[in-house]
Amino acid sequence: MKVILDEQTIQSISFFQKLTGAYVIDSMTDEDTLYFVVDKGQYGMAVGKSGEKIKKAEALFKKRIRIFEYADTVEDFLKNAIPEAKKIAAKDDAVEININGHDRPKVIGRNGGKIKILNNLIERLYSKKNIKLLTPMRL
């Protein structure tokens, strides 16, 4: 998928990179949150010791900031983004994620926000179109 970044997004990426020293691969925003995908192994650099860099960035941007670490495969990317996942399998253009039922609200996020952002990111970075959350049935 070809992604075209607007001028404001490019400026946000540049500013975040200068502030943290981490290389940003992609960025998205919603009403109150900025999302950055940083290069492999640079999550700690982006957050900083005791979260100092992320706190400073949130104060300067006046928005919440969430960071995801890039991985070579969509499965590894989602393992990093969704630690509650029990099993992740890429199938055709979708990704199936097994989670416990009580983790479902946390994984989906308020008003579906987290899962929407992750869906957009996996489409942009890995050409996968959909995340399917699977929970075991209770008997």
Image (cartoon, helix red, strand yellow):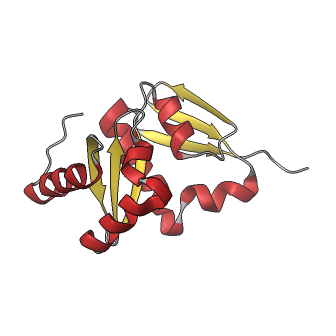
Q: Position of residue 9 (x, y in %)?
A: 17, 55
Q: How many marks?
A: 0
Q: Where residue 100 appears, x then y in whole percent?
A: 74, 49
User: Residue 34 or 104: which is nearer the viewer?
Assistant: 34
Counting from the top left corner in percent of width and height, residue 67 is at 40, 51
Corner quadrant of residue 103: bottom right
Q: Residue at x 74, y 58 (%)?
A: 102
Q: Quadrant of the N terminus?
A: top left
Q: Is residue 127 visible?
A: no
What residue do we see at 42% from left, 53% from top?
47
120, above or below 51, in the image:
above
Q: Is residue 49 visible?
A: yes
Whole-percent x, y for residue 74 in the image: 46, 31
Q: Is residue 8 above or below residue 134?
A: below
Q: Residue at x 25, y 71 (%)?
A: 60
Residue drawn at the location 30% of the way across and 38% of the way down: 124
Residue at the limit of the structure toward the left, as seen here: 7
Q: Nearer the viewer, residue 19 or 25?
A: 19
Q: Is 24 located above or below residue 32 in the figure? A: above
Q: Judge from the rendering whether residue 36 lies leftward or rightward of residue 69; answer left or right.
A: left
Q: Is 14 on the left-hand or right-hand side of 30?
A: left
Tell me where residue 116 sits by quadrant.
bottom left
Considering only vertical position in the picture, is 85 above or below 116? above
Residue at the far right: name it: 139
Q: Nearer the viewer, residue 19 or 16?
A: 19
Position of residue 4 in the picture relative to residue 23 (left or right) = left
